[in-house]
Amino acid sequence: MAVRRFVPEERLSDLESERRVISAMLHSEEACIEAYDSLKMQDFYHPKHQVVFELVCSLYEQEIRPTYVELLKEAHKLNLFRDPRDIEELKYIVEHFIDDENVRYWIKRVRDKSRLRKFEAFLRHYYQVLIEREVDDVEQLLMEAEGDLTNITALEVDDKVDTPYDLASLGYQEVERRFLRYKEIQEKHRGVIPLDGLTTGFDTLNHITLGYKPGDLIIVGAQTGHGKTAFALHTALAVAVRQHHNILYLNTEMSRVQIALRWGSILSNIEQDLIRRGDLTESQLSRVLQGYSLLRESGFYSYPCPNLTPEKTISIARKFKVQHDIRLMILDYVGRMDKITNNLAEWQVLEQIVKAQKMLAQNLNIAVMCLVQLNEDGTLQGARRMKNECDLMLKLLPISREEMEENEELKKYKRANYYLYIDKNRDGIGGVYIPIYFDKARQTMHDAERVSL
Amino acid sequence: MTWGLTNRRKQIQAELATLIYECHTQGRLSPEEMMCLLDILAALLDQGDTELANLLRRWASSGMGEKDALDINEIIRVTLVNTDWKDAFARAKGLELIRDLVSELEKEKG
């Protein structure tokens, strides 16, 4: 306590910044997401600000717009703010700090003061140690202090350095988990390997990759008109409709109606053209209706956005992670995103977009799938180096008539008309061509069936 | 992605919401009445519910508080308090009932 006397309170806190952050959260959704992601309750110095911040976050998680009125209602439910002075402080924030610009600046100030308080506590603690006892092992004390100080200076709150012990334990746990799982597979599942991540919707691809895992960036390339969106919706069908995981689908090209109609075709297995024209029998209409009832119960969240920017994808993904705990985000497609920086070459911009998506996948612990355009020769348009960033790169390649007739291997499959080519697979084998059947009329895909011998 | 309220509106809302909350903490409004008034305030200012605003205005000028209309006024008050103004179906039903009752009051007033 001796040290505390000499540190003025205002040096360890910045109430104005705290108010501005909370006010910005009440004013704008982007600010709300930013602060939600960057701050913790204890970063606020003022106890009332801590409570208000928690209330705003709790409302936001419940998908309730955190307005002043909603805050008052929530506070009433939780029996908070009984003192008129509490309300005065809240009202003051709402009325006087309504600027949401530069929210990152205010967040940084709040965090910096929070770190300063931790530093002050650190100093106080070791000063107290020196007052209270004779230090025999000076080396040990200094090492401890150094460790604590490093946590304040170099690391974010959630960062963690693995000691050799941590890493060895983690490694053994993982191997043991896999060993037990493998035994279980042999005994119970007759050799079918369960997935590590989300299903890909293709048995062969599941077998090779063990699914789309959290933190993975998956790039899927195809030429124009060769199934990019069909692949995206096939993935959505497998993950969101059949397995009921929540996913976010961002489309830069298609309207809401177009996306909804595509689903009609996919879920009813009726040709897209017939659905578009409305040329259906009563029984087909009933199938369409049944299909949409599956969509209604699914975890498919769609966000058609023709003017999508990398910044917006990050903001939207964070929002959906908080509110719907999404497991996968599909970006359809990268080449159509608005590029804010004009002074960079196209490949540089595309590379940056993809890098941002990889970081997003890791930070939110979700899988992110980006659809990209391929050139006619099957190379990646715009940015070859995108491949370096991803964990899995898939290409949809049409099988030519000549190849169908000449390739003996293909003759073992029924109706294979496309290859799903694994160009890169960080966790397993790459360079594999998987024959699939792509029904363009119905916009559906599946593994090509093997001809029984 | 701003929440969509202008600064002026925000200030008005803050003033009114604080007043309502304080009336409750001073015991002049029941918890239900406070919640109802906050919901109505949000409906008027956040969602710009002009239909509800017009109806309340009509009620205010139709003899609200006059002795011979006490029963009807009480039904309107209870309807306002018990309606979930965020629920579209409940809102439509509530508005319909209040509209009928206000018309009744207007007729009585002549």
Image (spheres, grey):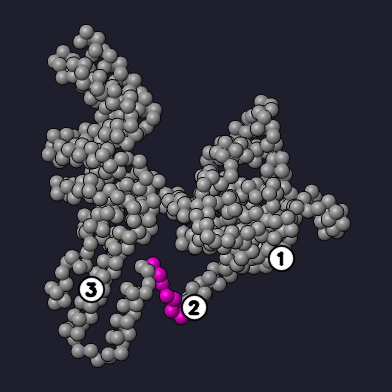
For image coordinates 66% across by 25% down, the residue present is: A282
Residue at the disc numbered 3: A120
Q: Position of residue B53 (x, y in %)?
A: 28, 26
**What chain does badge 1 belong to?**
A
For image coordinates 29% across by 34% down, the residue present is: B45
Q: Are marks 1 and 2 on the same chain?
A: yes
Count of all numbered marks drawn on residues in the image: 3
Mark 3 vs mark 1, CA separation in Å: 56 Å
**Magenta-tinted stretch:** A158-166
| Mark nearer the viewer, 2 or 3 | 3
Q: Earlier in the sequence, mark 2 or mark 3?
A: 3
Residue at the disc numbered 1: A431
Residue at the disc numbered 2: A168
**What chain does badge 3 belong to?**
A
Q: Residues within 10 Å of mark 3 (few under 14, many from 20)?
A: some
User: Residue lying furthest right in this view?
Assistant: A406
Q: A347 or A195: nearer the eye? A: A347
SS under mark 2? helix
Q: Residues within 10 Å of mark 2 (few under 14, many from 20)?
A: few
Quadrant in which the C terminus of chain A is drawn = bottom right
